[in-house]
Image (cartoon, rainbow, N blue to C red):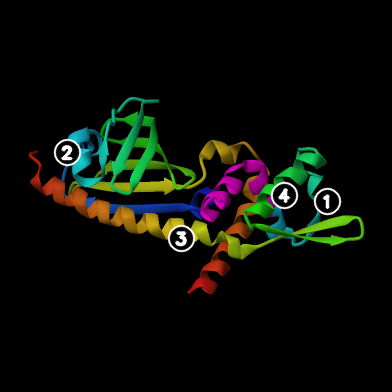
Amino acid sequence: MNIATEALSVVVERELPYPPEKIWRALTQPHLVEEWLMKNDFKPVVDHRFNLRADWGAVDCRVLAVEPNKTLSYTWAAYGLESVVTWTLTQTRAGTHLRMEQSGFRPDQRQAYQGAQHGWPRFLAALEQVLVRLD
Amino acid sequence: MSDPHDSVFRALADPTRRALFERLCREGERTVGALTVRSGVSQPAVSKHLGVLKQAGLVRDRHQGRETHYSAQLGALAPLIDWTSQMATFWQSRFDRLEDLLKRMDQ
């Protein structure tokens, strides 16, 4: 488990009573993506650059990984932060376990500095302190 | 003038700067010289990175004699927490819409 990933990350998971193939379509076909996420020019092709557009602005994205019915990953640049959104589909008896993780600092940036990892437990503790104070 | 959130994200997106900030969180107040050791970059580079962190409000400097001491400012991390909670709310609502769409879609 990489603690750094948790410092600035959002995870949303749901059990859905549909097969992965159906959910994959909703995650990758532009007209379907528009219905639940935003207007887009998405293509499930690695390195494809696309935008997600809403009334409040646009998100610049680039496809990082595509494994049909299993994994989809793209960068998500907005509000001065380039994050990575990763979708994971896992087939279950009742349908699919869908997981979305958005990480604020890109993995390659973490790996670029080996020493960084050691600092993260303390960094997390510091974040928790701030959270307590903000309550 | 740039958005203060932007400057915090930009400052921490750089791995060397993030490592410097983490060290200050971990070790408390340090001089530029002490931070240069084990940083893998030159002292002028460390000073430059500290300047960016300072502009973002992530570190504070204190001059004592010829030395400048730096310390981490944890309160400046608030934008990270804001970002995480805003995105969590955003994705929860999009998951709701996705579920709604799946109900309407053909197999």
Residue interval drawn in magenta: B1-22
| Mark 4 residue crowding within 10 angstroms, few (<14) / some (14–19) / many (20+) | many
Who is closer to the viewer here, A18 or B78? B78
Mark 2: few, some, or many residues within 10 Å (few <14, many ≥20)?
some
Q: Residue at x 28, y 47 (%)?
A: A55
- A78 or A97, nearer to the observer: A78
Q: How far is mark 3 from mark 1, CA to CA?
A: 32 Å
Using the numbered discs, state the Cα–Cα distance from disc 2 to disc 4 in whole angstroms. Answer: 49 Å
Q: Are marks 4 and 1 on the same chain?
A: yes
Say if mark 3 contacts mark 2, CB within 8 Å. no
The Cα–Cα distance between marks 4 and 3, rounded to whole angstroms, is 24 Å
Q: Quadrant of the C terminus of chain B?
A: top left
Q: Which mark is residue B50?
A: 4
Of pointers 4 and 1, the one earlier in the residue sequence: 1
Q: Secondary structure at mark 3?
A: helix
Nearer to us of marks 1 and 2 is 1
Residue B34's tag is 1
User: Which chain's residue wears label 2?
Assistant: A
- The amino acid type found where label 1 is placed reads Ala
Q: List the residue tagged with mark 2.
A: A22
Which image quadrant is residue A71 in?
top left
Left or right: A108 in relation to B33:
left
Residue assigned mark 3 = B82
Q: Is residue A87 left or right of residue B76?
A: left
Say if labels 1 and 2 share a chain.
no
Q: Residue visible at 7% across and 39% down?
A: B106
Q: Nearer the viewer, mark 4 or mark 1?
A: 4
Query: Label 3 lies in what chain?
Result: B
